[in-house]
Amino acid sequence: MTSLLAKVRELLKTDKSFTLLEGNDTRTDNIAKAQIIRFGDEKLSLDEPTDFELEGKQVPLRVIIHCWLHRDSSAADYLADCQDKQTTNVSFLQRNDLINWLSGRLESSQYINLGSSGSSQGPDEADREREQLTNGTKQGTEVTDSSVQNGKKDDLALAAALSQERPLLDHNSSLRGNRLVNVGYLIKDAELKLVQSLKASIRSKKSQNGTSHGRVVKTAAASRSGPRKEPIILIPSAASSIFTMANIQQFLRDSHYINPRDLPASHSDFLTVEKKLDRLSRPVKFIVVNNTRMFTKPEYWDRVVAVITMGHTWQFNNYQWNTPQELFQHCKGYYFHFAGDSVPQHVQQWNVQQVELDKSKRFKDVEVARFFWNSLEKELTARGFH
């Protein structure tokens, strides 16, 4: 018995046109609204599960057809349409594998488990063929002898083919590896960057929501919707930075600057600092991070309230907005430097707050820290914190 997915594949391979229908048999181009797909006189439900599996679960035919409709689309366009129609997003590698199988360029897919339903052979014939394929190499001589006795030339050709057959290899066995390598994180990283780039372009088009000193900010009403999550402060990951994970907590919490070279190196990627600000009703817990590897969801960028920069653009390579012009339109920027040191010309053109530290007079740290928190407090109130 042919499975639903195998049937759809045969129809698509023959370039048979199809029509999407809503529940009342009205034609539609919106896969999210459609209930039925019609190939000629044959109708199939788009909600019926198929043999295509994602994370061990069968996906409905709707997802398969949506991938096929986007077979010539870029990954960014496909992701945008998935978000717009709120449909299941199939990763680039899985979608590419599925489309190649549906079009006939591949005869099998690691994500499709047709079992015996996708085969036109009877059970006895399929068992005999599997037995021949398994034992063909070892029994090549025996098959040849048997073929001669039976006088069947076709069996001789089969025996010759089986004797030259090699077992199929996956990427682990072909590389002589004995450990299964999970590369799923690479797919998630690629998708995350695509989604972030897409959301950034959408936000730039909606920058009319409001500006503060040349930066795009959310309105207070919009920010108050939903539970409030901890705001994030990004700092450089370079050991030569004025602030590192080794000394940032002492400055933010205790208003005291210590040269990071005088402290043991910190191997942590994040820490928390709780601060009570005058204009806010309750203390705010801030998360301080020095890289964006833990930003597994695009929503983390909505929580970034401050970016401390050391003036090098490579710091922004893995950021959602990877140019200083765009980054500091969305996030409050700070450039800390020592008194007497000149500020680079390109930094002076960035939309950042320049903050001066004294190299030796530590009693001035309190004033500098107070200035930083007052400035950040204004940023928080503009975002709807209260």
Image: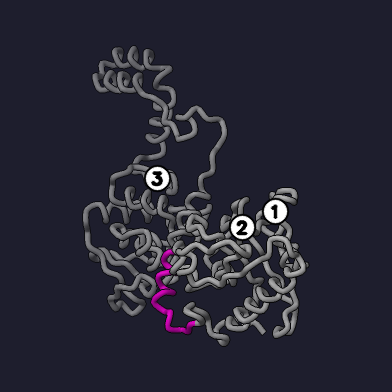
Whether residue 1 is visible here, answered yes or no, is: no
- SS type, badge 1: helix
Drawn side of residue 192 relative to residue 290, left or right:
left
Give me the C-alpha separation between circle 1 and circle 3: 53 Å
Q: Nearer the viewer, residue 177 or 275?
A: 275
Q: Residues within 10 Å of mark 2 (few under 14, many from 20)?
A: many
Closer to the N terminus: mark 2 or mark 1? 1
* Viewer-side label of 2, 1: 1
Q: What residue type is disc 3 on?
A: Ser
| 31 is within the stretch colored magenta | no
Considering only order in the chain, which callout, 3 or 1, is on the residue closer to the N terminus?
3
What residue sits right under mark 1 in the picture? Answer: 260
Residues marked 1 and 3 touching at CB (< 8 Å): no
Seen as rendered, the residue at the extreme bottom is 221
Q: What residue span does the magenta drawing correspond to?
A: 197-211
Residue 253: image location, x then y, percent: 75, 68
| Whether residue 156 is visible | yes
Badge 1: residue crowd in 10 Å (few <14, some 14–19, many ≥20) = some
Where is residue 345 drawn, in percent x and y? 46, 64
Q: Kindly identify which numbered label has been placed on residue 109.
A: 3
Tell me which label, 2 or 3, sits earlier in the chain.
3
Q: Is 373 situated above or below 262?
A: below
Vertical relation: 371 (above or below) 343: below
The Cα–Cα distance between marks 2 and 1, rounded to whole angstroms, is: 14 Å
